[in-house]
Amino acid sequence: MTESRLTGPVRIVGVGLLGSSIGLGLRAKGIEVILADASPTHLAISVDYGAGRPATPGDRPQLIVVCVPPDVTADVVAAELDAFPEAIVTDVASVKVAVFESLRDRGADLSRYIGTHPMAGRERGGPMSARADLFVGRPWVVVDHGNVSYQDASAIDDLILDLGATLVELTPEQHDAAVALVSHVPQVVSSLMARRLIEAPHASVNLAGQGLRDVTRIAASDPELWVQILGQNAQPVLEILRGYRDDLDRFIDALENMDAPGARRRVAEELFGGNTGFERLPGKHGVDRRYASLTVMVDDRPGQLAKLFNDVGDAGANIEDLRLEHSPGAQVGLAEISVLPEVLERLTDELAARGWRIAG
Amino acid sequence: MTESRLTGPVRIVGVGLLGSSIGLGLRAKGIEVILADASPTHLAISVDYGAGRPATPGDRPQLIVVCVPPDVTADVVAAELDAFPEAIVTDVASVKVAVFESLRDRGADLSRYIGTHPMAGRERGGPMSARADLFVGRPWVVVDHGNVSYQDASAIDDLILDLGATLVELTPEQHDAAVALVSHVPQVVSSLMARRLIEAPHASVNLAGQGLRDVTRIAASDPELWVQILGQNAQPVLEILRGYRDDLDRFIDALENMDAPGARRRVAEELFGGNTGFERLPGKHGVDRRYASLTVMVDDRPGQLAKLFNDVGDAGANIEDLRLEHSPGAQVGLAEISVLPEVLERLTDELAARGWRIAG
């Protein structure tokens, strides 16, 4: 554990998933954390979870992290800047231009404010879902605006590094365009797909497989939060949604005229474009071809996965990624294990020798 | 292993992923399997993999399973009905009305044909991706049309049960509407989303997380296959896509006028509809709330997962589902373990007592 360079206490306003997770992460580094929340219940839970202590009069935080819903973020940041004239203030809202403009327009002291956005979250919200490692290895965007001194800004950098995240610098406009693309529009696309299931016959939805599940997983997200996010980032989202709709119109038109010359080619090109776009994604499921995988059949009873992973460990292989597949009613599951390519053959032989059924 | 009721040999025409997997599954039951394919290379691979033996003159198959691409399925089924006048013939194409109508229109012997569709697959195709358990626990649709005797049809039922799948009976129209909803439209929605990434700046795509990855995963599918599928099921797909586009138009309109009365409510209702639709999905990630989950931090080195699963097994808990999360560059991963709710508390205590860091 490296020593933090943050010295003074950190005050966290809003102790939901993000606020409480930041508190837990900083406490694990031995940093004093002060918690504040409009909900006494949330505050009590977060304190019980060990995310920090309740605020008291006379607190003198070095750094304030505002973790409230997007539509009240600017108000709370402004109030904190006023209440603590020596503190650096940041926020973690998932839209940045609207918050910054609101603060500038009301004449807030921008020399002590930098917006940030950690690219981390869970489907479940609230302090009870918090975890100290929520930000480990995730990008955390810092939205610099040139009014803050390098020295003052360093407290923000320290916060991000303390929590194990990777610092990414973007302008507010770059940030909002980026999250519109990688987060906000996918949310809309997924929700609208899931809507199609509302009226569908049981016989239809019962045929659903992993493909539809993956496409619609984030459709389970909180609508109230998303109305705020989309409302504050409407223009960048609209720009991408309009391009998406143009594609959809072309697609529908081609499908309505499949016998017309060139229609099949147009459909193929739209789908092929999906291949090309998908390959641009970072990480294990995108362009990263570092891993090879094998699939092992596992009986659905206690101890079987443990036995499998023991055997994988005995073979000297490190599991880089894993996906379990288990159909309702089936007596076996499938474990797809990703490993470095150079160990795949040896591992496959070793597992087969130990009686595992290798399925692919 | 239960004894199969299939007696005569089964002939498989087309030894890609599905054909070879069927062959492997039937061979595991001791059934004689005859393989045929237009590609001598594919055929040789499939035979080497143990999916069956090559066809020879004089073969008298009891059952023929046609596993060729959708746009040649009807042609091949008709040819097989002619060539083997005593055999029952089925196919596994993912569209059923077009194949059936094509056979009926050319006067094929429908008293010996029933179409089917196993709801199983993998992103990778070809005989090298085949596996005997591909269909275990998956729905397999039988498209009855009333021209086949119960006794003749039973060979198809036997095939499906032998391969461990769950038999689902639908009309051709019900089937095509169902797969349009749960498979074909999600493919289009996912591909069109992924297309938006093609021209995006690196800084944007580098912020992508699991949400976008899930929404776009199936965008990596084979465009040529999908042009055939969509072309043969255009009307049901169009019907759903038009509803999707209407929703999208409404959504864009509301987002363009977020300050107008009722606009925010309209956006919220569209998103809330996504919640409702998602909850209709079967399986562990849908309405199935049978499981509780806990998240454990796991160091990224060999043997750690094995140790974790040993400890879970020692605690007497069966892992019902599991999701590994591992950000590039991070030294720890997160294992989200799903278990029966009644064992959650005990398991959490047990793992914590053994030094595991419980993250949620």
Image (tube, coloured by chain):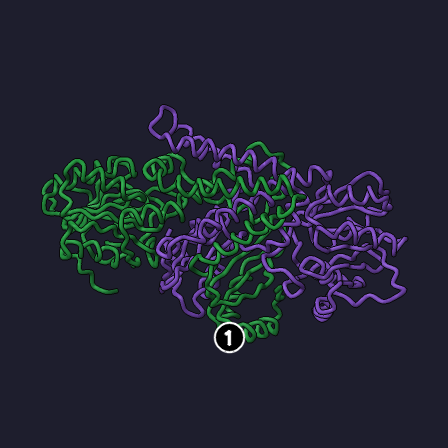
Chain colours: A purple, B green
Instruction: Identify the image quadrant of the N terminus of chain A.
Output: bottom right
Q: In the image as oriented, which residue stretches furthest toward the front?
A: B261
For the residue pair A205 and A94, the one nearer the viewer reads as A205
- How many other residues sit within 10 Å of disc 1, few (<14), some (14-19) or many (≥20)? few
At x 53% / y 57%, what residue is drawn?
Answer: B324
Q: Chain of mark 1?
A: B
- Residue A339 screen position, x and y as percent: 49, 51
* Picture residue at 38% right of the left edge, 41% below the top: B237
Badge 1 amino acid: Glu
Residue B114 seen in this snapshot: yes
Secondary structure of residue under mark 1: helix
Front residue of this view, candidates A221 and A19:
A221
Asked if residue B241 lies left or right of residue A284, the reply is: left
Q: Residue at x 35, y 39 (%)?
A: B235
Q: Residue at x 39, y 41 (%)?
A: B239
- Residue A287 in sight in this render: no
- Give how far across and how far down residue B41 sits, in percent: 28, 36
- Which residue position is annotated with label 1? B342
How many labels, in total?
1
User: In the rendered view, does B225 fall on the left or right side of B64?
Assistant: right
Which sits in the foreground, B231 or B221?
B231
Position of residue A294 relative to residue A281, above or below, is below
Q: Where does the image place residue A35, in percent across and percent down from the top left?
A: 78, 63
Where residue A220 appears, as percent x and y from the top left, is: 54, 55
